[in-house]
Image (cartoon, rainbow, N blue to C red):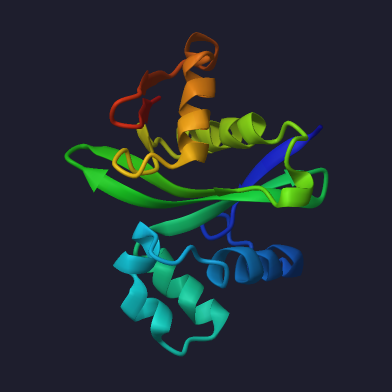
Amino acid sequence: MNLEGKLFIRENLFDDETARDYVIQKVLTDIDSDSEFEIKNQELLRQEYNPFELMQKLASLGYDVMLGYDNEEIIGHIAYQQHQEEDKISWHMFRIFIPEEKRGRGYFIPLFKEVIKKARTYKISRLKMGNEKTKNPYMVVLINALKRREKKLGIKIDEENHLLTL
């Protein structure tokens, strides 16, 4: 496995046809109904925008998606929104997705390690993993897996608040 993460908006992958098609099909059109993202952005999502315009609107609200690549193949993504809280910048991750046919191949933790690496590159101090109230089962599994790797990854996990400090 040779996993690499790329941030679609921040790293300007709009001209990469494979990345753009993936984001349109798996991120913009496959939205969990009644998710916090869908509820928060329902007015925007109901507008008639072409995908590029919608991506730009979402980017202006701090949204981005990290695409995970194994060699040149996209194996999944993590969507997040950037927040400024006091003097700290955090990424609030609200969707981790690995297609069913790629699940069970060990991509989950390496994909999140790429998020940690990118967050450090962009001087992000905290990662919020889902919503502690909804207890998304994927986020709970991720938090438990990362908790076992805290020292090795140089992170601190606040399980109760679903918060990872870098």
Q: Residue furthest top?
A: 151
Whole-percent x, y for residue 154 in the image: 47, 15
Whole-percent x, y for residue 112 in the image: 57, 34
Q: Residue at x 64, y 62 (%)?
A: 13
Q: Within the image, what quadrant is residue 30 found in?
A: bottom right
Whole-percent x, y for residue 106 in the image: 73, 31
Q: Is residue 136 left or right of residue 13?
A: left
Total marks drawn?
0
Q: Residue at x 54, y 37 (%)?
A: 115
Along the line of sight, which residue is nearer the eye, 66 or 15?
66
Question: Which quarter shows the C terminus?
Answer: top left
Q: Against 152, is 31 above or below?
A: below
Q: Is residue 15 visible?
A: no
Along the line of sight, which residue is nearer the eye, 123 or 165?
165
Q: Residue at x 37, y 45 (%)?
A: 92
Q: Is residue 40 left or right of residue 142?
A: left
Along the line of sight, which residue is nearer the eye, 109 or 133?
133
Question: Which quarter shows the N terminus?
Answer: top right
Q: Residue at x 68, y 65 (%)?
A: 22
Q: Residue furthest left?
A: 86
Q: Is residue 133 visible?
A: yes
Whole-percent x, y for residue 134 in the image: 34, 44
Q: Is residue 49 left or right of residue 101?
A: left
Along the line of sight, which residue is nearer the eye, 122 or 137?
137
